[in-house]
Amino acid sequence: MQEIVENAARYFKQGDFHKARELYQKVAARYGVSIVEVNLSLCDQAINPSRKMTFADNGEEEILYSNSGMISLPAQKISKQLQETQSLLEKYFILSQK
């Protein structure tokens, strides 16, 4: 599963958002959508740029609509989410081996 997340992150960085989303869906099917929810949202946002997702100061997701075509989350948040997803998957993999 770790390889799937690494590949999904690589596809996302390369701009192949459909392939990245497909791989994140595989992760969601196995471990639950909550650990890749932001990743899936980022892919959806990149695929459909008229839908823009932002986070309010209280951490709640806000959906705004725009024709900007830009991903609204800063690179730091994207990177952090990818790292957190990877860490969780590694944890679940270790637990599943017991």
Image (cartoon, grey):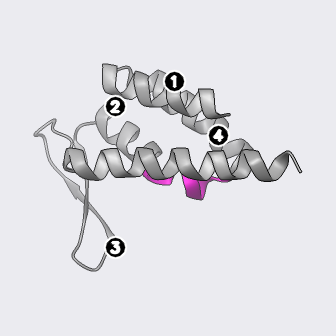
Front label number (1 vs 2): 1
In the rendered image, the residue lying farthest to the left is 68
Q: Work out which quarter of the rendered image holds the N terminus and state it.
A: top right
The reply to whether discs 1 and 4 touch (Cβ–Cβ < 8 Å) is no
Disc 3 to disc 1, C-alpha distance:
28 Å
On the image, numbered disc 1 is attached to which residue? 7
Q: Give the side of residue 66 with respect to residue 21, left or right.
A: left
On the image, numbered disc 4 is attached to which residue? 27
Near-viewer residue (93 or 50): 93
Front label number (3 vs 2): 3
Query: Which residue range is magenta in the image?
Result: 32-38
- Label 1 or label 2, whichever comes before in sequence order: 1
Q: Say what secondary structure mark 2 lies in.
A: helix
On the image, numbered disc 3 is attached to which residue? 60
| Above or below for 82 versus 60 | above
| Above or below for 97 versus 7 | below
Q: Residue at x 31, y 41 (%)?
A: 45
| Above or below for 47 versus 32 | above
- Across and down, in percent, residue 34 comes to 58, 58
Q: Quadrant of residue 97?
A: top right
- Label 3 or label 2, whichever comes before in sequence order: 2
The reply to whether discs 4 and 2 touch (Cβ–Cβ < 8 Å) is no
Inspect the image, locate mark 4, and give the three-letter code of the amino acid beneath it: Val
Q: Quadrant of residue 18?
A: top left
Q: Say what secondary structure mark 4 lies in.
A: helix
- Across and down, in percent, residue 30 comes to 74, 44
Inspect the image, locate mark 1, and give the three-letter code of the amino acid beneath it: Asn
Visible in this render: residue 50?
Answer: yes
The reply to whether discs 3 and 2 touch (Cβ–Cβ < 8 Å) is no
